Image (spheres, rainbow, N blue to C red):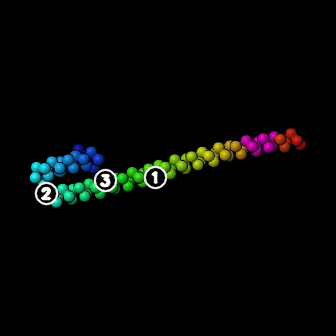
Amino acid sequence: MDTNTSKGLRDRLFNSLDKFIAKEISSKEIEGICYLSEQIIKTANVELEFQREINNSARLEKEFDLKIAIEEKKAAELLQITLKNVEENV
């Protein structure tokens, strides 16, 4: 069993809870387990938020590149029309 996953964390927490209920571990030990679990969860949340920001940044960059490409195409089309009009009037 891979304990370094959210399922592994849940399994360990419930196992610790069962041990606490069975009076196999002290309330002090449970407090320590809860504190460590909270820190693991906070770290995971920070990592998720960071990944969301990275993904959002990449999406915005792609959207910007697409807008630039569209504007370049419009500018090229306008230039062709202008050149055609100039040639017709010469």
Residue under numbered circle 2: 26
Q: Residue at x 54, y 49 (%)?
A: 60
Q: Are marks 3 and 2 in contact (CB under 8 Å)?
A: no
Q: Is residue 83 left or right of residue 49?
A: right
Location of the C terminus by quadrant is top right
Q: Are marks 2 and 1 in contact (CB under 8 Å)?
A: no
Residue under numbered circle 1: 53
Q: Main secondary structure of the magenta part?
A: helix
Within-10-Å neighbours for mark 1: few <14, some 14–19, many 20+: few
Q: Magenta segment: does it hold 78?
A: yes
Nearest the viewer among 68 and 36 is 36
Within-10-Å neighbours for mark 2: few <14, some 14–19, many 20+: few
Could you tell me how far apart the alpha carbons at marks 3 and 2 are, in whole angstroms? 23 Å
Residue under numbered circle 3: 41
Would you place residue 84 above or below residue 39 in this image?
Answer: above
Within-10-Å neighbours for mark 3: few <14, some 14–19, many 20+: some
Which amino acid is tagged 1? Glu
Q: Is residue 62 left or right of residue 29?
A: right
Residues shaded magenta = 77-84
Q: Where residue 14 sits: x, y (%)?
A: 20, 47
Which amino acid is tagged 3? Ile
Could you tell me how far apart the alpha carbons at marks 2 and 1 are, in whole angstroms? 41 Å
Q: Residue at x 63, y 48 (%)?
A: 68
